[in-house]
Each structure stands twice: as C-alpha cells, then as structure tokens.
Amino acid sequence: MLPVMMKVVKIVDEARGIKSFYFRHRLDSIPGQFVMAWIPRVGEKPMSIAGDDGKEFFLTVSAVGYFSNAKSRLKVGQTIGIRGPLGTCFSLKGKEIALVAGGYGAGPMASLAEKAINQGYSPKKIHYLAGARTKELLLFEQRMKRIGVDVQVSTNDGSKGTKGMVTDVLNELIKRRRKANKPLDMVYCCGPEMMEKAVFDIAVREKIDCQISVERYMKCGIGICGSCCVDPTGWRMCVEGPVLDKKAISKISEFGVYHRDATGRKTFF
C-alpha cells in the first residue's frame, strides 16, 4: 500500500502542546482504526484517527518525540503521506455505554461517541470519561458537550473534575448506574496501557463487556514485519488489533506487563 499525499488544510490547537491536523479526503474510517503517516525525510509512524466526518479527517498530535515534533511543525498547505485506514475498529454494542479516554486516547473515544449519536443512541446513555495529568492536557471536553453526552473528567492534580484517576470515575459511574437500575453493559477504552489494564480488570470484576485499543510498536502497519505481535498468541496489533474484546485480551499475557521496543526487546511497564 503506497501512501496518498495529502495537504494539511487546517490546524487546530487543542490543548497545551497538542494540535489537530485536518485533511480534506474521504478516508471512510471507523473509530479505533489508524493510519500510517509519512513525513518525507523524517519517517513513518502509526497515528490514531481522532475524527472523520466522511469529507475530512484529522490526526491529533502531541510533540513528544522526533516524529511528532516534526509533524507539529507542519503548516497549512504542506503535504504528508497517509496509508489507511488500517486495523480493527470499535463496534457499538449495548444500551448504556462508557467511553474511557486517557490522554491522547480521547480522539478514538470522542469519534465513537459521535458515531453512537449518529446511530441513534440517546446522549444520556453515552458516558464520556476523560482523564489527564492536568486540566491543560484534557482533550475534546467541549466537543463532547456540544453533542450532549454525559461528560466526566478527572485530573491527576485535581485542577479540573475529580482528583485522581479516570478509573476512579468509572468505578463511581458503575455504582450509580446500578443503583438507578440502569447498569452499564459496555465499556470502551483507549489510552495508556496501565490505565487500560485497570479498566479491563474493572470490566472483568464487574462482569461488564469491554473493547480496548492495544498499542504496540509498528513498522509496516500491514502485518508483514511482525514487530507488533503480542505474546503468546502472535496476533499482530496492526491487523488482528488494535481493538480487541475482553475475551481476546484475556489471552494476551503481556498486556499490562510489558511491550517491545523497535529491536523487539521487552520493556516492562
């Protein structure tokens, strides 16, 4: 699959050090999928799709590494290569759903909330839980409030919303919905893996179905190189993943324990 060269048509400052880059192209992606983004003379990296309305899509980037710093310096009118959409996606199930977003995982979760609204879900039955280290790093809170879903935020430092982890908010939501006799029947999650592992453990404990996006180091994005395989199944997170259900995740022994770097060496969380 060769990259399609696309111009940046708009850039939006989302939060401190975080920007969204818009491309006018019909990508036809589904929330949870990703693209391989190529910057000439810099390299190629997988990136989650933060939004796609059928006419244009956007990628949300924080300048934290060599590639993301290069991408954050792009200007409107400049061109990069895009391959995709790639990978598995989230599938909407259940009547009362929670979308748990940690940090940059907010993009796929916000996109899924918009898809749920478009498919006829009541906004009152969609609970968007977003966590970040501080309020300056929270993503897409206003985007979600505009479509009327239940928005709950947490920050590690208590600068906005609940002080603590987004999993604390999830635990409280589960209790409240059960008390109201309207229990959650599906949890979706995207974010840092240790947060995802905590969400998975809650889903198992509370006997709630879940789907989680599992990130691994990717080189090709199309299942050839094997760099994103997980133990012991050998599943490629660019093909069999990144979105997996609860049954599949339970078979991955490395989830929440370690991942592999570019050389294949184990790096423990």
Image (cartoon, grey):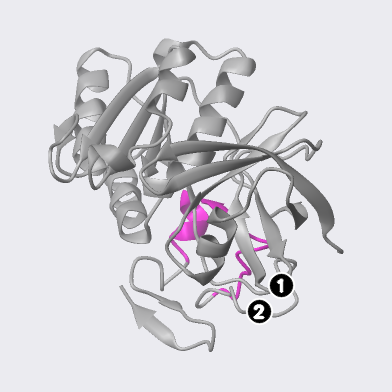
Asked if residue 197 lies left or right of residue 213, the reply is: left
Residue 220 — which label? Answer: 1
Mark 1: secondary structure: loop
In the picture shown, does residue 103 fall above or below 121? below
Most prominent secondary structure in the magenta stretch?
loop
What quarter of the picture does the N terminus occupy?
A: bottom right
Residue 241 seen? no
Residue 253 seen? yes
Mark 2: secondary structure: loop
Q: Is residue 211 magenta?
A: no
Asked if residue 31 lies left or right of residue 181, the reply is: right
Asked if residue 219 lies left or right of residue 199, the reply is: right
Residue 196 is situated, as x and y percent measured from the top left of the image, at: 36, 53
Q: How many marks on residues? A: 2
Residue 112 is situated, as x and y percent measured from the top left of the image, at: 55, 31
Q: Residue at point 41% right, 85% down?
A: 266
Q: Which residue is mark 2?
A: 226
In the picture shown, does residue 26 fall above or below 119? below
Query: At label 1, which amino acid type do we have?
Result: Cys
In the picture shown, does residue 31 fall above or below 42? above
In the picture shown, does residue 32 fall above or below 150? below
Distance from Cα at disc 1 to Cα at disc 2: 8 Å
Query: At label 2, which amino acid type do we have?
Result: Gly
Q: Which residues are magenta?
A: 233-251
Callout 1 crowding tier (Cα within 10 Å): few <14, some 14–19, many ≥20: some
Comparing labels 1 and 2, the label whose residue is closer to the camera: 1
Residue 38 is situated, as x and y percent measured from the top left of the image, at: 71, 64
**Which label's residue is closer to the chain start, 1 or 2?**
1
What quarter of the picture does the C terminus occupy?
A: bottom left
